[in-house]
Image: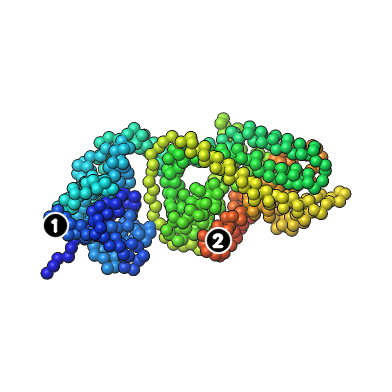
Amino acid sequence: MTLPVPLVAVVGNPNAGKSALFNALTGARQKVGNYPGVTVERKSGKLLLGDGRPVELVDLPGAYGLDPSSPDEAVTRDVLTGAQLGERKPDALIVVLDASNLDNHLRFTLELRSLDLPMVVALNMVDMAARDGLVIDPAALSAELGVPVIETVAVRRRGIEALREALGARLGTTATPVPQPESLAREARRIAAAAVLSEAPVRRWTHRLDRWLLHPLVGPLILALVMFTMFQAVFAWSETPVGWLESGIGALGAAITERLPDGVLRSLLVDGIIGGVGAVIVFLPQILILFLFILALEGTGYMVRAAFLMDRLMSRAGLSGRSFIPLLSSFACAVPGIMATRTIDNEKDRLTTILVAPLMTCSARLPVYTLVIAAFIPNRQVVPGVGLQGLVMFALYLAGIVGALGAALMLRRTVARGASSFFMMELPKYQLPALKDVALGLWQRAVIFLKRAGGIILVTTVVLWALASFPKAGPGEQQSEVSIAGRIASGIEVVVRPIGFNHDIALALLPSMAAREVAVSAIATVYAIDQADEAQAQQSLAERLGKNWPLPTALAFLAWFVFAPQCVSTIAVTRRETNGWKWPAFMVGYLFALAYIAAGATYWTAVALGL
């Protein structure tokens, strides 16, 4: 009777160099197919041991653990446990570790020991670890794990023969059962520390900082402090450059007014284009300050740590940790954030992330927030170094995050019911951000913002100017009331007046569906058309709002924009990513309902408190 050829599985985390090692061991003796019953690729090959014995090697899909979060990881689990249809259980394992990320990769290794299979560890990419100043003692690692550990550089075929010999010695032996530690992560860090002979100072500082920045209690407090500082800076640092832009735009409008006779052309240029688009452009410094912080945090490596901290919170809301990066991208713009959900394997996780992405406070909301805050919130310090305006801005961003998590929790329990997937992330070392990269990122954001101002905002503002300018008001009439735009706004006002919105806001809501910033340019355009005297012309938009709106209305307007899905591009990309209008219509409906409820609750509460 012929004994079956031993089956050896090559297993490890994604990006450990597993496939490169498999290729180095099998060479051209490979075949590719699919596992029975699933569309997951199966790569197998023949390996000859030093004594001539043949071995069948199978390259399993990368996995972070035996609790699968994707079809690939489910196949890996099923093969290793013998549950995969048409696949026999392996006789031994080659576990591939990334030497430069040892503590993270050791978690899966410790979990694999519970399978009681003969195991050989390939400590791969030791050249990359050495380049980073990390020296590992394979003998110490072997003693901790109780299995042979062979240093390899798979892409250069270094260590291949030693690995082949170690595998031959382990085949046919019986693995010694090892108790599973209470905490895989803690045990992995302990073993990694015992096996590391030396490391570069930057790696030591990385570990020291992570003890605090990733601490379950201290870490979230530090993250909140970073965000709070960022929003304080948005107001404190931008005051001077915003003043420069306001003066420049005002001077440009005055110059055109002096040189052109009163008429349609002057009104279009001064009231429509300069008054409307200029009201948005003045917020460019605040947007650049916001992105200065974001780019700097990304460059230091801290942003990935923020993802790790937020992952714990999001999992309680039923979101996968894989949702963090798309939601983080949505702080810039929901469109790339929704497109980034393509990396999420779980269908329900992806749908939920798409539906809540518009709740993350994108940069388009910033002009609306800063305008209303500047008009109604005093520029005073609550405590030394903490301004009231920055505190309100922080609260608005926090409200968006809380709203997104709350909506995700409800969606996961209703229309997107299902199990959440597992998530692991690689933590880079800390470093100083490259000034060139930060400068390039700021330049790109400025170009995007100005193109948007010169594109969709300009077109929408000109259309609104035309609708708000005709027909002309008669004696004693208000132009914004009798114009085409004014009459449309009067119809909308019937619906939104119960939540405290006035005619100005009703007029701004419809054009702001094109882009949220248009709400600012719309209000500015109408005020420019309606201005009765030179004194009003000299007032800033914030000053005019402060005199024309009661505080409860202003607060309700802010609450509305925390939730309202006023962006055609976001709706369009949602339709494309979900292959139909069902989910975009659902998203628009539930977000408008949330916006109406939030604005109404804010207005009624403010009125009840006598504000």
In the visual, does 418 lie left or right of 269? Answer: left
Q: Residues within 10 Å of mark 1 (few under 14, many from 20)?
A: few
Residue 365 in the image, given as x and y percentages of width and height: 60, 47
The reply to whether discs 1 and 2 touch (Cβ–Cβ < 8 Å) is: no
SS type, badge 2:
helix
Q: Tell me which residue sits at (50%, 55%) in the image.
A: 339
In the visual, does 608 lie left or right of 97? Answer: right
- Count of labels in the image: 2
- Sequence-wise, which precedes: disc 1 or disc 2? 1
Amino acid type at mark 2: Arg
1 or 2: mark nearer the eye:
1
Q: Is residue 393 above or below residue 460?
A: above
SS type, badge 1:
loop
User: Which residue position is annotated with label 1?
Assistant: 52
Q: Tell me which residue sits at (35%, 66%) in the image.
A: 38
Depth check: give the residue in front, 61 or 584: 61
Residue 351 in the image, given as x and y percentages of width and height: 49, 59
Instruction: Report if residue 532 is visible in the image.
Output: yes
Q: Tell me which residue sits at (55%, 49%) in the image.
A: 333
Depth check: give the residue in front, 598 or 249: 249
How far apart are labels 1 and 2 at the CA level?
Answer: 59 Å
Residue 454 in the image, given as x and y percentages of width and height: 65, 46
**Which numbered marker is on residue 270?**
none
In the visual, does 448 lie left or right of 465? Answer: left
Q: Residues within 10 Å of mark 2 (few under 14, many from 20)?
A: some
Q: Tell me which residue sits at (43%, 59%) in the image.
A: 346
**Which numbered marker is on residue 575?**
2
Q: Residue furthest right?
A: 475
